[in-house]
């Protein structure tokens, strides 16, 4: 087995509790091992450099039909940025909706090794897996969407948690999915009638159920199964002034539920891209930050985790299974809009968006995302994301690190805003002098997100026994630096090991890695009702048969990593 | 002003992508102009493999004039992104002449194929001949089309003229094919000859002037009144139509602003 010894680096690892001490990290085969367990290793000199575990992205839209709609309807996103193949690197293109190839390479360059696709329409699971298969280097899993699924709505209307759980187990297996994702519960289904559910007690037309019942029911079903990840939600009323009350109402639905299962997470709800859900005011004119109220709740309730959804001030492509929101957005910015309805399951919309520093609302959004992270008492529960590509492309993570780690960098950006004074009045950021350190960044980007996903026994840290996902960055935290040095160093890893394979050597991609697909196989007691319901719905409503629906075989998931869950006990 | 003369001596087997033929690139080149890269399909070649090159470039784009001679109907991207200086094309050229140009002047003594002046921001593009489709339009998918500068075509232009136009001016001496100023939010298009159909579809703002016939008027345009105007040096009475009534429009001082389509009234 190939052995490596990464010597003398400044190691930041929340799993081992190492805060920048000079430590050696040893790799043998695909695992991290004790340093005395390697006999004749290749030595990587990390003197004066930063060493961390491979990054773990809890939420990004990087594969599947709506990502591909974005690619297809935005040829201009590839204008002047395509690159021919070179060495082991294949041809790449795209900025906010990059090709699968560029997606894998760009994550690797930032030292990321695990990325979760945040919304997989079950009917298009095959497409999603084909794209993930073609995304090199990084391990991936995909979250099928459940919050507007007819089976789920009908079971939860009657409070049939066991049936909902059996259906979830079946769908995770059928789609090779990883977790229970909920997008605008009930609202996307209502969009089929041109309606929406803007708060948690709005009834879903026809189904006689409310978003609150859907969310609570899916949390309970998730814990009934004891899945690795918790229910993962994008709540109702995204992106509207005054929506923070809906967010708090959604948070409260997690109260009183305890996490179950063997995966070591503490939360029963992960609320994603909370930046989009933390707005006060009642119009775009008086919209302000309620990040303080949101973080008061998050800080005092340890059964919740969140991620930022940080606006990066770029031109990007928004895409979500929140169909009504995307229509709302195209009415605002008048740019092109694509809408897709996915039969009994979900819908999606796609609209390009330009987050301009000259627009007050965009600048306030930028502040809110950073406030969420800077007000976090426990960085193990607040993760760095851009809801890629919705609030900005993931390649900006190193820039977000710069903003989080440097008040000077934040002030430079605040000074560049056209409406600086109004923005400061509407937000809290000017009064926050906290600067995160690399240990806290490692919590927000690796250890914390891995724990919340229930894969802390696989990755997210540097403890012996974990998968050998290790990044070395050309950054010396003990020498003086300017903020831009952070962005530069963490966007261009000097070395990256992925499952023990040396994929980046001296900043060059030298291997396409050994990409794995994570999926969850949950065993439940036989449930004849759910089996019958599935057969009947396919017969009556679906445009495909079951045989053309399920994801199986080597073609879709050539290198699976199956996480077994036994819910029969 | 220094002048570089390029004469094509070898035709490419496929098409030659030569975005280096620009005063900006020539003026900034420290080495030989002949060594600048050009592409045929996926293969890279030297500019000198296809052109005989004489003269020298100036030290600035504004001080550089390029004359390109011969049959250039397989050469793309001449004058792309140029900011200053002058390009004269003696012959027919392929697609993307003057695309994204920001300043300076291009004169084509011949025809150009599609996408000339795509995303143009400034400068002058004069075509003494015919233009292909998508003259002065946006790049595929983009909503930011021509924003400034002036395009003059002495002959005819093809379809999809000025798509997503936001500013600047296009003057066509002859006739145009379908789709004029689709999605436009500004700018001026003057057509001295005839137009076919679908003028101003989803147009938000901007102006179209037609001196000749229009085969089919868009149903989204409504006749308002006759006005006396001087357009590109010609005086006359024009019928004013406003539209596209199916699109969103902004208000200025309480008045709705529409796209305007003027057609010369002939006795």
Image (cartoon, grey):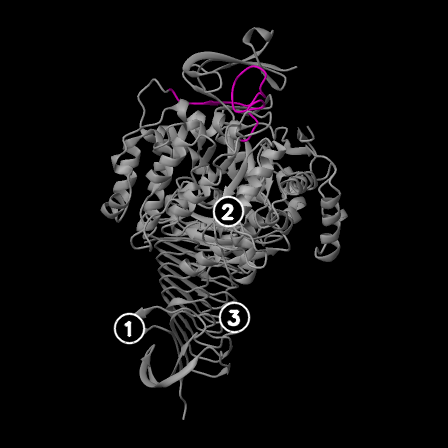
At a point 39% along the width and 66% down the height, the residue shown is: B185
Residue A418, image x, y percentages: 26, 48
Q: Is mark 2 on a helix, strand or loop?
A: helix
Given the image, what chain letter belongs to the residue carrying mark 3?
A: B
Q: Which residue lies furthest to the left in this view?
A: A421
The label shown at residue A216 is none
The image quarter containing residue A284 is: bottom left
Say whether marks 1 and 3 touch (CB < 8 Å): no
Given the image, what chain letter belongs to the residue carrying mark 1?
A: B
Disc 1 crowd rating (10 Å Cα; few below 14, some 14-19, many 20+) is few
At a point 48% along the width and 27% down the height, the residue shown is: A448
At a point 64% along the width and 46% down the height, the residue shown is: A122
Residue for badge 3: B158
Residue B246, image x, y percentages: 45, 73
Q: Is B266 on the left-hand or right-hand side of A164?
A: left
Q: Is B23 on the left-hand or right-hand side of A261?
A: left
Range shown magenta? A453-476
Q: Is mark 1 on a helix, strand or loop?
A: loop
Residue B99 seen: no
Disc 3 crowd rating (10 Å Cα; few below 14, some 14-19, many 20+) is some
The label shown at residue A212 is 2
Residue A384, image x, y percentages: 44, 34
Say whether marks 1 and 2 touch (CB < 8 Å): no
Asked whether B248 or A83 is in front, the reply is B248
In the picture shown, does residue B76 fall above or below B154? Answer: above
Given the image, what chain letter belongs to the residue carrying mark 2?
A: A
């Amino acid at each position: 087995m190939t052995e490596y010894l990464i010597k003398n680096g400044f190691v930041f690892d929340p799993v081992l509790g190492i805060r920048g001490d000079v430590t050696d990290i040893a790799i043998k085969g695909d695992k991290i091992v004790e340093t005395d367990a390697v006999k004749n290793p290749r030595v990587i000199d990390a003197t004066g450099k930063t060493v961390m575990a491979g990054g773990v992205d809890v939420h990004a839209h990087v594969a599947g039909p709506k990502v591909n709609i974005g690619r297809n309807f935005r040829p201009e996103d590839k204008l002047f940025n395509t690159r021919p193949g070179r060495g082991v690197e294949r041809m790449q293109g795209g900025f906010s909706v990059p090709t699968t190839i560029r997606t894998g390479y760009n994550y690797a360059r930032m030292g990321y090794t695990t990325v979760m696709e945040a919304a997989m329409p079950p009917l298009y699971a095959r497409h999603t897996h084909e794209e993930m298969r073609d995304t090199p280097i990084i391990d991936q899993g995909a979250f099928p969407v459940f919050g507007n699924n007819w089976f789920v709505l009908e079971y939860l209307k009657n409070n049939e948690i066991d049936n909902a759980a059996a259906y979830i187990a079946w769908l995770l297996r059928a789609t090779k999915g990883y977790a229970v994702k909920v997008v605008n519960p009930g609202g996307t289904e209502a969009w089929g009638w041109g309606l929406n559910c803007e708060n948690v007690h709005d009834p879903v037309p026809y189904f006689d159920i409310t978003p609150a019942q859907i969310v609570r029911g899916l949390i309970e079903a998730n814990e009934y199964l004891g899945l690795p990840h918790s229910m993962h939600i994008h709540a109702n009323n995204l992106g509207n002034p005054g929506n923070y009350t809906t967010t708090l109402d959604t948070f409260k639905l997690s109260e009183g539920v305890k996490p179950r299962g063997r995966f070591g997470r503490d939360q029963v709800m992960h609320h994603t891209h909370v930046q989009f859900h933390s707005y006060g005011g009642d119009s775009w004119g008086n919209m302000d930050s309620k990040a303080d109220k949101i973080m008061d709740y998050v800080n005092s309730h340890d059964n919740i985790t969140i991620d930022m959804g940080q606006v990066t001030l770029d031109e990007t492509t928004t895409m979500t299974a929140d169909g009504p929101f995307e229509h709302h957005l195209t009415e605002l910015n008048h740019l092109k809009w694509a809408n897709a309805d996915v039969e009994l399951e979900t819908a999606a919309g796609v609209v390009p968006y330009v987050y301009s520093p000259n627009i007050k609302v965009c600048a306030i959004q930028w502040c809110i995302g950073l406030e969420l992270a800077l007000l976090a008492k426990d960085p193990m529960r607040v993760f760095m994301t851009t809801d890629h590509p919705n609030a900005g492309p993931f390649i900006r993570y190193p820039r977000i690190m710069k903003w989080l780690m440097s008040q000077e960098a934040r002030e430079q950006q605040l000074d560049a805003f056209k409406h600086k004074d109004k923005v400061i009045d509407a937000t809290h950021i000017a009064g926050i002098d906290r600067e995160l350190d690399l240990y806290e960044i490692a919590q927000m980007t690796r250890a914390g997100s891995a724990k919340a996903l229930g894969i802390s026994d696989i990755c997210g840290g540097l403890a012996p026994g974990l998968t050998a996902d290790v990044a070395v960055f050309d950054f010396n935290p003990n020498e003086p630096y300017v903020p831009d040095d952070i962005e530069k160093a963490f966007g261009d890893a000097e070395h990256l090991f992925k499952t023990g394979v040396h994929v980046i050597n001296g900043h060059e991609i030298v291997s396409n890695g050994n990409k794995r697909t994570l999926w969850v196989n949950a065993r439940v007691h036989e449930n004849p009702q759910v089996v019958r319901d599935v057969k009947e719905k396919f017969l009556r409503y679906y445009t495909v048969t079951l045989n053309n629906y399920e994801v199986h075989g080597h073609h879709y998931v050539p290198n699976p990593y199956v996480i077994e869950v036994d819910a029969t006990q | 002003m220094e002048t570089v003369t390029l004469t094509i001596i070898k035709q490419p087997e496929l098409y030659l992508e030569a975005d280096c033929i620009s005063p900006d690139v020539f003026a900034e080149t420290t080495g030989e102009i002949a060594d600048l890269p050009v592409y045929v399909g996926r293969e890279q070649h030297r500019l000198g493999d296809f052109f005989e090159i004489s003269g020298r470039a100036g030290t600035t784009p504004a001080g550089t004039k390029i004359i390109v001679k011969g049959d250039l109907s397989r050469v793309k991207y001449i004058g792309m992104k140029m900011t200053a200086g002058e390009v004269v094309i003696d012959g027919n050229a392929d697609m993307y002449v003057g695309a994204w140009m920001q300043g300076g002047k291009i004169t084509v003594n011949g025809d150009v194929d599609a996408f000339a002046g795509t995303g143009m921001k400034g400068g002058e593009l004069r075509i003494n001949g015919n233009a292909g489709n998508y003259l002065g339009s946006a790049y595929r998918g983009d909503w930011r089309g021509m924003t400034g500068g002036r395009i003059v075509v002495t002959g005819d232009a093809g379809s999809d003229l000025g798509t997503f136009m936001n500013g600047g001016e296009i003057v066509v001496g002859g006739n145009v094919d379908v789709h004029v100023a689709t999605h436009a939010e500004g700018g001026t298009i003057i057509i001295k000859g005839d137009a076919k159909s679908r003028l101003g579809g989803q147009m938000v703002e901007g102006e179209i002037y037609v001196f000749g016939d229009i085969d089919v008027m868009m149903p989204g345009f409504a006749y308002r009144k006759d006005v006396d105007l001087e357009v590109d040096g010609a005086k006359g009475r024009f019928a004013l139509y406003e539209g596209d009534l199916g699109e969103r429009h902004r208000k200025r001082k309480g008045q709705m602003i529409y796209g305007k389509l003027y057609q010369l009234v002939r006795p």
